[in-house]
Image: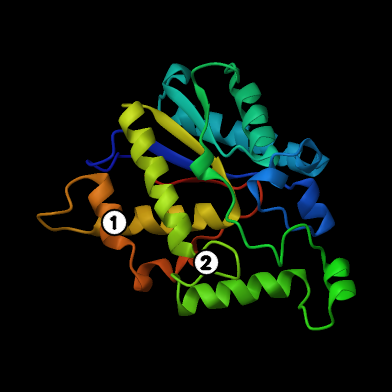
């Protein structure tokens, strides 16, 4: 897999394994709640993370990439931290070492207080006017497609998430060179990140030589509104650049 010239590293993304909130149909999107230990991986999610780690190791071996060149950058949420730990164990990389780094800007998209810690059943009990859990997600994604700069009430827009993901990528690129980096994050952030990077690879022009300038150039409604095309299943690994 060739590295795009303006990237200093190779990248894979991994959505966390199935979590306890996933099992309960519970929205846990704030940093405060997301880092609570009771919201880590469910047993099925641990298995998914194990399989993802084995697949990642296979791809590393196929590309003749030594383990000392691997870095795992992960969201601080319990479910992503748990996933990263499992993968590090599969790779036999010390999790509490320099090869694994938590990056707050990789955290989950905050969907707003209307959704936070709400489940399907709780929504129905709170108000007959509130749509069930997955239908509300669909409502947000419909809003994203219409206007990715529009925020759900009290929450983050696609562009808000894109802004902090751009900061995360610039930080990673400035810190590491010649590494194979696994980004462990969440559904919406990884959709948005892939959308940004895929578009950034294609853009040309005199003022878009660096990663930062390329990402800023593609943070436009036409591109950001399409992030759902890059969706990932829980525990799904994907090479990006």
Q: Position of residue 4 (x, y in %)?
A: 27, 43
Let me know if residue 9 appears in the view: no
Q: Position of residue 99 (x, y in %)?
A: 49, 21
Q: Position of residue 184 (x, y in %)?
A: 56, 40
Q: What residue appears at the point 27 percent right and 47 percent down from the top-left corner? A: 212
- Between tags 1 and 2, which lies in front? 1
Answer few, some or many: residues within 10 Å of disc 1's Cα (few below 14, many 20 plus, some between 14 and 19): some
Left or right? Give the position of 124 relative to 149: right
**Residue designated by label 2:** 228
In front here: 40 or 123?
123
Q: Are marks 1 and 2 in contact (CB under 8 Å)?
A: no
Left or right? Give the position of 161 relative to 169: right
Q: What residue appears at the point 36 percent right and 52 percent down from the top-left corner? A: 197
The answer to which image quadrant residue 126 occupies is: bottom right
The answer to which image quadrant residue 58 occupies is: top right
Q: What residue appears at the point 22 percent right and 59 percent down from the top-left corner? A: 203
Q: Secondary structure at mark 2?
A: helix
Q: Which mark is residue 216?
A: 1
Left or right? Give the position of 18 relative to 91: right
Q: Which mark is residue 231?
A: none
Looking at the picture, does residue 158 appear above or below residue 214?
below
Answer few, some or many: residues within 10 Å of disc 2's Cα (few below 14, many 20 plus, some between 14 and 19): some
């Amino acid at each position: 897999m060739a590295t795009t010239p303006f990237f200093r590293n190779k990248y894979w993304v991994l959505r966390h394994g199935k979590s306890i909130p996933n099992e309960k149909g519970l929205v846990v999107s704030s940093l405060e709640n997301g880092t609570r230990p009771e919201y880590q991986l469910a047993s099925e999610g641990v298995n998914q993370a194990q399989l993802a780690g084995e697949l990642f190791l296979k791809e590393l071996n196929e590309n003749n990439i030594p383990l000392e060149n691997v870095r795992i950058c992960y969201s601080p949420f319990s479910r992503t931290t748990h996933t990263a730990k499992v993968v590090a164990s599969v790779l036999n990389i010390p999790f509490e070492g320099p090869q694994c780094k938590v990056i707050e800007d990789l955290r989950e998209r905050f969907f707003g207080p209307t959704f936070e810690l709400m489940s399907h059943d709780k929504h129905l009990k709170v108000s007959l006017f509130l749509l069930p859990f997955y239908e509300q997600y669909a409502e947000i994604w419909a809003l994203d497609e219409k206007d990715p700069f529009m925020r759900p009430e009290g929450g983050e827009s696609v562009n808000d998430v894109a802004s902090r993901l751009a900061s995360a990528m610039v930080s990673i690129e400035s810190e590491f060179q010649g590494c194979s980096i696994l980004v462990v994050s969440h559904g919406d952030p990884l959709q948005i990140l892939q959308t940004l990077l895929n578009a950034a690879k294609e853009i040309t022009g005199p003022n878009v030589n660096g990663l930062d300038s390329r990402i800023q150039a593609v943070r436009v409604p036409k591109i950001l509104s399409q992030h759902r095309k890059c969706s990932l299943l829980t525990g799904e690994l994907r090479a990006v650049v």
